[in-house]
Image (cartoon, grey):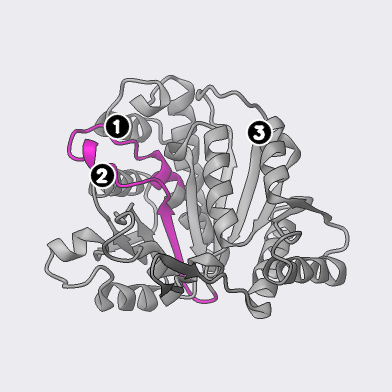
């Protein structure tokens, strides 16, 4: 069994985490969960901080975590748990696969792309200062090491997944130094190591326009931090929303898989939450175990779970956010019943 740190999170987090654990158990996934807390839940459990050292230590020990949504106050209050987690564990590559789901009607067909986002720099470095009354500045940080690291990661990922095209979104026409460095790194990695992979560059605003015109023309999108955050949510909207969008964060030594939607405190405890995003993230975790730790049992479990939730959706078992009538519990049962 592989030990995985389970971070339930806030709001609907504990409900969707329980759902995933039930499906994993029914699918005989070779995973044992140990629970640790972060976010508001950590404070409520007496930790005294939103990202306890015990939680970080557990992830460092076991190398893997599955995380539910954590609340981040807007404008005031404590810093984002997600940002702190990524920076503390050096989780530099955020990966968001986006594909059409069976039985979920959308305006677009044949969407199958992956957003790869640099996860540690840019404006999310959190360097902000008040330099005069009513004047504040926020610093966008870029280092050549981080730019080259994420470029290598994206091209390697594309090659390993037999994806044929990498598109870089940028604003180097305005931010000539930071985004310029990002482009230089991508061009160098492409030319020196992956010349057979199709490569293109698009200014971010034009790129988003083309995304909503025809998302099927894209394959792997490589973005710096802020652009990747915005683009990944836009892409989720193309296929049904954040309820069907998994996410993962990779570093050299650790990986954290997460639901990227919010904690939805307004529906917490009402059996209304859609657990699919976290379940899909859990499937990514199992596939990672199969690749990184050469565990065929994990690959089999991942395939069983994916087949089960695809079949459930095809046969009309959907939660309300996807146009159905099922609650969290009923959808979980629907997936378990289709495990083969």
Q: Are marks 3 and 1 in contact (CB under 8 Å)?
A: no
Residue toward you, 197 or 31: 197
Whether 321 is drawn above or below 20: the answer is above
In the image: residue 232, left or right of residue 309: right
Counting residues from the start of the chain, the first of labels 2 and 3 encountered is 2
* Other residues around mark 3 within 10 Å, as few (<14) / some (14–19) / many (≥20): some
Q: Mark 1 = which residue?
A: 333
Q: Mark 3 = which residue?
A: 212
Whether 84 is drawn above or below 332: the answer is below
Residue that appears at 50% across and 76% down:
253
Quadrant hosting residue 218: top right
Report the disc number at residue 61. none
Residue 151 screen position, x and y as percent: 70, 67
Label 2, label 3: how far apart the Cα atoms are: 30 Å
Q: Mark 2 = which residue?
A: 12
Q: Examine the rendering and report whether any part of residue 298 can be seen.
A: no
Residue toward you, 219 or 205: 205
Q: Examine the rendering and report whether any part of residue 198 can be seen.
A: yes
- Magenta stretch bounds: 252-280
User: Which element is circle 2 on?
Assistant: loop
Residue 152 screen position, x and y as percent: 71, 69
Residue 59 screen position, x and y as percent: 36, 72
């Amino acid at each position: 069994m592989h030990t995985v740190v389970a971070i339930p999170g806030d709001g609907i987090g504990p409900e969707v985490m329980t759902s995933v654990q039930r499906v994993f158990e029914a699918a005989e996934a070779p995973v044992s969960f140990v629970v640790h807390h972060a976010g508001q839940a950590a404070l409520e459990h007496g930790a005294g901080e939103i990202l306890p050292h015990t939680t970080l230590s557990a992830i460092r020990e076991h190398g893997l975590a599955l995380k539910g949504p954590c609340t981040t106050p807007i404008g005031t209050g404590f810093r984002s748990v997600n940002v702190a987690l990524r920076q503390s564990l050096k989780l530099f590559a955020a990966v968001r696969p986006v594909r059409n789901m069976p039985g979920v009607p959308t305006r677009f067909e044949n969407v199958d792309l992956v957003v790869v986002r640099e996860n540690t720099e840019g404006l999310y470095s959190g360097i902000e200062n008040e330099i005069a009354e009513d004047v504040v500045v926020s610093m966008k940080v870029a280092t050549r090491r981080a730019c080259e690291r994420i470029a290598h990661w994206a091209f390697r990922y594309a090659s390993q997944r037999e994806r044929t095209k990498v598109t870089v979104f940028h604003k180097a026409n305005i931010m000539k130094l930071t985004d310029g460095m990002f482009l230089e790194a991508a061009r160098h990695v492409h030319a020196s190591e992956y010349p057979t992979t199709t490569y293109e560059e698009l200014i971010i605003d034009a790129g988003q326009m083309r995304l909503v015109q025809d998302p099927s023309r894209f394959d792997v999108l490589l973005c710096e931090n802020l652009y990747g955050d915005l683009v990944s949510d836009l892409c989720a909207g193309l296929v049904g929303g954040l309820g069907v969008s998994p996410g993962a964060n990779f570093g050299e030594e650790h990986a954290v898989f997460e639901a990227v939607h919010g904690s939805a405190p307004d529906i917490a405890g009402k059996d209304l939450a859609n657990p699919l995003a976290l379940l899909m993230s859990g499937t990514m975790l199992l596939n990672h175990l199969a690749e990184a730790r050469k565990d065929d049992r994990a690959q089999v479990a991942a395939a069983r779970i994916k087949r089960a939730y695809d079949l459930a959706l095809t046969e009309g078992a959907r939660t309300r956010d996807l146009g159905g009538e099922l609650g969290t519990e009923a959808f979980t049962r629907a997936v378990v019943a289709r495990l083969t």
